């Protein structure tokens, strides 16, 4: 599976937007970009995914670069409950087997009140 | 609660003992995954099932590890002759695989294993 690179940590103030970058320069044409997050003492949870176009849902937005070599997860107004480790993961939807998730180290987001 | 559940949530054992963990996936989900997570690291894939068939095993899954999903519903993960290096959080996830539908994975809260 293609590799992703994320900063180890980021800080944000409550109510402000958070932009989480992810580099994936070796992404293949069939790789989707997925984001999961892991709140303290919980299992990971799905946030958002996309292929080429920017995506929005109730949790976040995903902005994908035109060459798809990088993407940014945007939390529009961070709350204290958004403090978590955010993982950027590439997954090939064309692979018949597995669909396992390959997690990297993620970005630990700290939200200050 | 209709999410993924895992039991026990915590397990402390002595080196050399056997342990077994259980995962109950979301009821209609046909895929079930096991991951392991050590402190400060992201989860690592161990194995997955499509219904009752175990279709992939990671190289991390040594001979001391065995997983089953006998009726395609709940799953168990057994570790024999535990070692201190087995201390980790064991996470279970489930998903629904159907043509044309994205199968996001839903994770349970995990079982934290401590081997003394």
Image: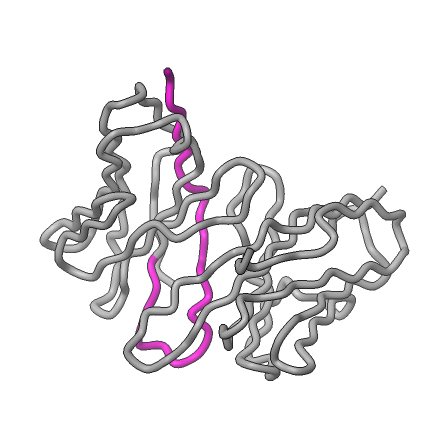
Instruction: Name above or below for residue B33 compared with residue B15.
Output: below
Q: Main secondary structure of the magenta part?
A: loop
**Residue at image coords 15%, 59%:** A52
Q: Is residue B96 above or below residue B37?
A: below
Tell me which segment is drawn in magenta: A90-113
Badge count: 0
x 57%, y 66%: residue: B25
- On whether residue B63 falls in the magenta region, the answer is no
Is residue A29 shown left or right of residue B27?
Answer: left
Q: Quadrant of the N terminus of chain A?
A: bottom left
Nearer to me, A42 or A103: A42
Q: Residue furthest left?
A: A66
Percent position of residue B93, x then y: 53, 61
Q: Residue at x 65, y 48 (%)?
A: B89
Colour mapping: one colour
Name the image quarter holding residue B6: bottom right
Query: Camera-side residue: A66 or B72?
Result: B72
Image location (x, y in percent) of residue B37: 59, 49
User: Is residue A3 placed above or below B102 in the rendered structure?
Assistant: above
Q: Position of residue B110 (x, y in %)?
A: 63, 51
- Is A110 drawn above or below residue B52 in the view shown? above
Quarter of the picture containing the C terminus of chain A is top left
Does residue A96 belong to the magenta stretch? Answer: yes
Which is more toward the observer, B45 or B76? B76
Residue occupying the point 26% across, 46% down: A58
Displayed quadrant of residue A31 = bottom left
Q: Residue furthest front?
A: B1
């Amino acid at each position: 599976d293609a590799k992703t690179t994320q900063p180890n940590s980021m800080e944000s103030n409550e109510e402000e937007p958070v932009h989480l970058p992810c580099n994936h320069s070796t992404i293949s044409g069939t790789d989707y970009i997925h984001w999961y997050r892991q709140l303290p003492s919980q299992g990971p949870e799905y946030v958002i995914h996309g292929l080429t176009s920017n995506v929005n849902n109730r949790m976040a937005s995903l902005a994908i670069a035109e060459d798809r070599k990088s993407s940014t997860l945007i939390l529009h107004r961070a709350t204290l409950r958004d403090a978590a480790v955010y993982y950027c993961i590439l997954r090939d939807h064309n692979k018949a087997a597995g669909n396992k998730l390959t997690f990297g180290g993620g970005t630990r987001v700290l939200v200050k009140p | 609660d209709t999410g993924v559940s895992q039991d026990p949530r915590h397990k402390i054992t002595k080196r050399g003992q056997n342990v077994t963990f259980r995962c109950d996936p979301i009821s209609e989900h046909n895929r079930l995954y096991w991951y392991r997570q050590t402190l400060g690291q992201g989860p690592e894939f161990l194995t997955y099932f499509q219904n009752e068939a175990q279709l992939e095993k990671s190289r991390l899954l040594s001979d001391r590890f065995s997983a089953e999903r006998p009726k395609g519903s709940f799953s168990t993960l057994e570790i024999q002759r535990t070692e201190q290096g087995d201390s980790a959080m064991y996470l279970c996830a489930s998903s629904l695989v159907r043509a044309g539908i994205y199968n996001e994975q839903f994770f349970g809260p995990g079982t934290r294993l401590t081997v003394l």
